[in-house]
Amino acid sequence: MDVDRETLETARRSLHGVAELVLAGPQYRQSGTIRLRIVRGGFGTVQDPDLRVNGTELVVGGREIPMNGTTCRELAAAARVDAGGAGDVYKDGSGVGLDETLGVEAKAVEYIEECLVRGHEALAGFAPNTMPVLWPEHFDVGISLDEVNYGVSLGDAHLDEPYAYAGPWEPRQGSFWNASFGAVRPLRLFPGADALRDFFVEARDRAAHDPHCP
């Protein structure tokens, strides 16, 4: 990864803000869902309004609006949507303000979107009948299957780098489960989608057989 940590963190925070305040919030007010999806080059809404992020640009119809150096309020105005989050649907979020200047350096964005695509591909291979969702709350791509959450996070207070996770709704005992909410592994440890899928497979098997925490 040929990008420094500060630039990467700025891009991650900025994209999270756009996902939450420009895509998910307006979509929730218009169509009643906060779910987003991974698309070629980035991510987008699943229902109206039809918006997507492609690299460092917000795409609205045939228009491409550069995001770097602008704000979520300005982007929403250019896209003709009502900027803002989804109210009290969830408590956490990006922490990005509507007038915060966004920093989306191209190489950092490329790396972030590569992580999202890897997560989407691994989840689709692991559970082909379940559509992965990009959630705006924590900006992670994931699924729920048999009362276990699986996914890829771009990093947060728990682990400040992209990581894969598996979180049983009821905690399990055993060395595999190395986090309070389940199991996490840095994404850099997985050489490709197959290895990442294998982690989800192992997590599913262990969740089915490991004892529940008392």
Image (spheres, helix red, strand yellow):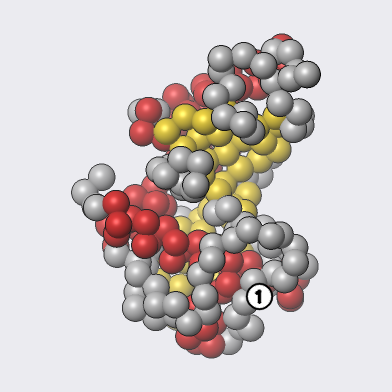
Label 1 is placed on what type of residue?
Pro
Q: Can residue 116 be seen in this view?
A: no
Structural crowding at the residue carrying mark 1, measured as other residues with C-alpha within 10 Å and reported as few (<14), some (14–19) or many (≥20): many
Q: Which residue is drawn at 47% across and 29% down?
A: 185
Q: Where is residue 94 in the image (x, y as percent from the top left)?
A: 54, 62
Q: Residue at x 67, y 16 (%)?
A: 173
Q: Single out the residue that lies furthest toward the left.
A: 2
Q: Is residue 1 visible?
A: yes
Q: What is the number of callouts on the image?
A: 1
Q: Position of residue 19 (x, y in %)?
A: 54, 65
Q: Single out the residue that lies furthest toward the front.
A: 214
Which quadrant holds the N terminus? Answer: top left
- Front residue of 214 and 109: 214
Q: In this view, does 138 lie above or below 176?
A: below
Q: In this view, does 151 lie to the left or right of 131?
A: left
Which quadrant holds the C terminus? Answer: top right
Instruction: Choose top left, top right, bottom left or bottom right for residue 176.
Output: top right
Q: Residue at x 69, y 60 (%)?
A: 91
Q: Which residue is drawn at 57% across and 29% down?
A: 179
Q: What element carries label 1?
A: helix
Q: Where is residue 212 in the image (x, y as percent from the top left)?
A: 75, 18
Q: Name the residue under label 1.
A: 26
Q: Position of residue 170 (x, y in %)?
A: 76, 28
